[in-house]
Image (cartoon, rainbow, N blue to C red):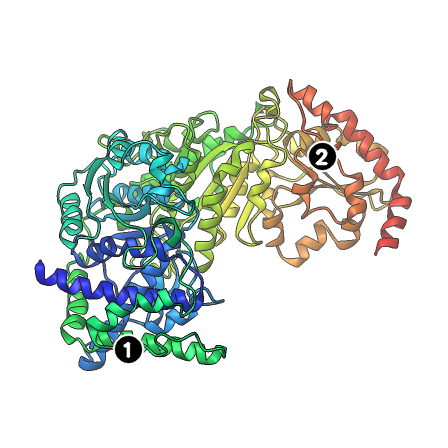
Amino acid sequence: MEKEFQLWEKIKDITYQYLDFTLNYRQSGHPGGSHSKAHMLISLLFGKKMTYDIRKPEYRFNDRLILSAGHTIPIIYSLFAVIGDAFDEIYRQTKDAKYLIDEDKLVRYYDLLTFRHNKGLPGHAESSGKTLLLKFNTGPSAHGLPASVGQALALKKAGLQNVKVFLIEGEGALTAGATHESQNGAWAYGLGNLFWLLDWNDFGIDDRPFSSVVYGTPDEWFSAHGWKVHETMNGHSWQDVYSTIKKAVEEANENTPNLMWFKTKKGYEYGVYDNKSHGVPHKKNSEIFWETRKPFMEKYGVEFVGFGKPAPSDPEEEKKQWEENLKIIKRVLTSDEELSKYITDTLVEIAEALPKDAPSTFVLNQNPYKDPAIYDYKNYPDWLFAKPGENVPNRAALAKWGMYINGVIGRKYGRPLIIATSADLTESTNLHGFGLGKDDFAGFGVYDREKNRNGAILPSAITEFLNAGVCAGLATVNLSENPYEDFNGFWAITSTYGSFMYLKYGAIRLFSQMTQDSPIKFGKVIWVAGHSGPETAEDSRTHFGIFEPGVLQLLPKGKIINLYPWEHNEVPVLLAAALATDINNIALHLTRPPIEIPDRNALGIPSHFEAAKGAYIINDFDPNRRKDGTIIVRGTSTTYNLIKLLPQLRKDFNLKIIAAPSFELFMMQEDEYRNKVLPLEDWMDSMVITNESKKLMHDWIFSKVSEEYSLSSDWDNQWRTGGTVDEILKEAHLDCDSIYSGIERFVRDREKRLAKLKSIL
């Protein structure tokens, strides 16, 4: 390997120059951790222990790479530019198609000019564009770790445990709680195909070493969690770094996750070290910047434009100088034919070692996501739906739907459609149904790393961050032959209390960003707020969510569908309708207490199938009476109590009452339907009733006048307390008497309301 190490050293030298010039001229980015990771990254990409096709980052059998330390993306851009420039040069010389890499699939030197500029190379790691080889958006501390667990798990469950997941992180992020959860999860799931590379440089941003505030070493941190640990105290020795990676991969066993840690120097060969090198590039064309260029110039016989001088005052001249110096660096690479050929031939050799097909696995045989049985709710079996008069919670429908959906797919394709995970709340939030069987189908049961890898229920403890990241990771593993056109892999579902949904938001937003920007098709994740609203009354205010579920609305419109079924039979209908769309994030809000299933025919209200449209008319205006206004209602107890009042309301008032289980689905309907249900005239003359806060009904509230008359759990801008459901609904002014009184006031003040609205408009 001695010859390879010499070539790796030159790759490192060129990479550092690309990196340093980029950060110096841009005056932004993170040099210290980027410098310290060069040896592990080059050894990984060229050492033939990671198997991938640099030309086809989307290839389904590539080993996967996650830069969890997403702020050190400059080292990735710079090394990718070295690789891209080498391939361009050898292709120019040979015209051999095996050296051709599409321009939009890998960085070139000129792309470095766009670093941290709009539409250019992003400031943290993103799985899109020219860095599609990176498999998750990262930057927030430790958020890449649970995603790596999910990706490794998806591969293992698909029978592709020989496809590996490599993750690069620093020790600072390991202090985050997500790390502890991910360590436990990786062991529990038996992820022998998971490899973390830890850059242990002992510094982050603050002026103190991590070892002064964190006990122990990576050996202790990971061995205690059942991981296999490999290390070197010399993270800047090619021999030691490569040997550590080689040993870890070759000695890996099937069910034990792997850690490699490397003792490094933050800011290695940068001239500024430790925390001082973290996120502060050298001042533009400063003395220390030019001083640290000298070894490269002397070693390779070049001189940089403007060497030793201040930066040009004219921005265009400055950019020109930057580009000229990048070209000088590139020529050091391309003038060395041996090095360029080594880079290209090594990576082509690695690529050609990839399998063209994989051993037969249930995931790759057929694609179940096109099966109409998933989405055809009108032909769902009768047993999925409760009968009028039954007292059942809406959450119970999720268990039955999960049993049905994984059962119907399991019979046809031999695999579960959806993988479920909950933080010690699997039965409480009714996710257990995804593992249950019915009739002649035994069900997939609980996943076990040795005995039941086909299990649909992931066993987990109280690991909210892990569960969210695992779901996002699972859904980003696309095993389709045509990943730009189709998705084949796993969908996921995870649940918690509505009041705890904020714990999952990091993974939700990163996953959403990826689904927006990546050309690769991803799967879907269902985020279940399993005990939401004030109906979780006995647990009191710490556990019932009237504000917290709002994080599930904090995405751009069109990036998530929120579902609020008020009763059991709307749950499967809404899920089918939402999953039939091309939106990847689905949020399902459920409540805990049972309510009586309405006799819709007797009450003269539409079928539960109408919930698929996002909103439907429970009660329409009597054309022979003066209109008294429109009521838009959402939530379990609110709608249930309103339905109990329906005969009296029909007698006393002339109201249009609209059930509003999903604004997003409603907005997908044809204009004709939306204008029938909620024409502008009716919407202007409306109020809302919700079991959550008014803020979370903002899409349905027409105006401040409407808001003034609306009913919600936060009517007095106070946190609710606790007690029985009836007690808390009364405190929230959502009991039958309060709802009637609120509607009565709304009707009584109609002329005043409309006049006030007119003055505003």
Residue on which the image places disc 1: 303
Look at the image and tell me in which quarter the C terminus lies. bottom right
| Foreground of the two, 200 or 430 | 200
| Quarter location, residue 542 | top right
Query: What's the amino acid at mark 1?
Result: Glu
Residue on which the image places disc 2: 712
Judge from the rendering whether residue 664 lies leftward or rightward of residue 2; answer left or right.
Answer: right
Residue 215, x across and y down, in percent: 33, 31
| Quarter location, residue 225 | top left
Q: What residue is rendered at 61% in x and 31% in y? A: 533
Q: What residue is rendered at 40% in x and 54% in y? A: 71
Q: Secondary structure at mark 1?
A: loop
Q: What residue is rendered at 64% in x and 35% in y? A: 635
| Quarter location, residue 338 | bottom left
Q: Is residue 188 above or below residue 198?
A: above
**Residue density around tag 1, few if under 14, some if 14–19, many if 20 or more, within 10 Å:** some
Distance (Cα) linking label 2 and label 1: 70 Å
| Foreground of the two, 320 or 140 | 320
Residue 118, x across and y down, in percent: 49, 67
Residue 34, x across and y down, in percent: 33, 56
| Foreground of the two, 212 or 75 | 212
State whether residue 614 appears in this view. Answer: yes
Query: What's the amino acid at mark 2?
Result: Ser
Residue lying at the far left in this picture: please name it. 2
Q: Is residue 229 above or below residue 344?
A: above
Look at the image and tell me in which quarter the N terminus lies. bottom left
Q: Is residue 317 above or below residue 183?
A: below
